[in-house]
Image (cartoon, rainbow, N blue to C red):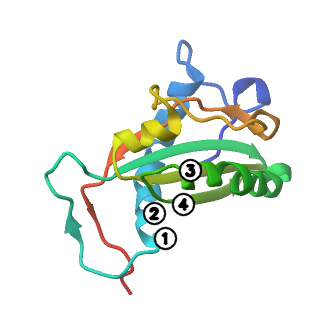
Amino acid sequence: MAILSRPDRGGQTPPDGASYTSWMRKRHASLIVPALLALTLLAPESPGEATLASAAPSREIIRVWRGHTLDAKADEYQRYLVASGIPRIRATDGNRGYSILRRSEGGRTEFVVISRWESLDAVKRFAGADYDKAVILEKDREYLLGVDEKVLHYESVAEEIGRK
C-alpha cells in the first residue's frame, strides 16, 4: 500500500466529497491491527501465555497516532520525536510504555506512535479533556506533510508478550 500525501502535496486524491482525513483513516485502517500486533511483540515485558484483560473498567488503553514526512526528513523527525514527544508521554502518570513504528515507501515515511495507558484518565492527563485530538508538537508542522489531528483509542483485551 502506498503512503499517500495530502492532495496539495502531489499525492493521490480522495473520491469526490470525501475529506482527506476520513479517506486516509479508511485507507490505513488495515494498518491498525498489524501495528497493535507489533506493539505486543515490541513491549518490554516478561514472557507468558496470552491473557484476557479483566472485565473491570480499568482495561489498558492503547492510543494510536500517525504522521507522514518526506524520506529526506524522516531521520531528523525521528530524532525530534524521540527527544521531544516521547519524554512528554513517559512523564505522564499512568503511561505504561510506547512504540514508534516507521515505514518508508514512495519517497514518504510514515510514523505510528502507539502508547499504552492504565486508563482513559491517564490519557486525559497527557492529552487533555479532548483526548481524541492529537498532541501536536511545536515543530511537527515543519516535518509532517499533513498533521492528522485525530488519534484512535482501543481497549486492550488480550495480549501475548515475549513469546519465543
Dot 1 crowding, Cα within 10 Å, few <14, some 14–19, many 20+: some
Which residue does the numbered mark 4 point to in the structure image? 99
Gap in angstroms between the C-alphas marked 1 and 4: 7 Å
Which residue does the numbered mark 2 point to in the structure image? 39
Name the residue type under label 4: Ser
Name the residue type under label 3: Ile
Check the image and report above or below for 75 versus 15: below
Is residue 26 shown left or right of residue 101? Answer: left
Which residue does the numbered mark 3 point to in the structure image? 89
The secondary structure type at the circle numbered 3 is helix
Mark closer to the chain start, 3 or 4:
3
Mark closer to the chain start, 3 or 1:
1
> To which quarter of the image does residue 101 belong?
bottom right
Is residue 36 shown left or right of residue 92? Answer: left
**Hey, which residue is sitting farthest left in the picture?**
55
Gap in angstroms between the C-alphas marked 3 and 2: 16 Å
Which residue does the numbered mark 1 point to in the structure image? 42
* C-beta proximity under 8 Å, tags 1 and 4: yes
Residue in the foreground of this view, choosing between 117 and 13: 117
Check the image and report above or below for 103 versus 134: below
Q: From the viewer's perspective, is the residue at label 3 or at label 2 nearer? A: 3
The secondary structure type at the circle numbered 4 is strand
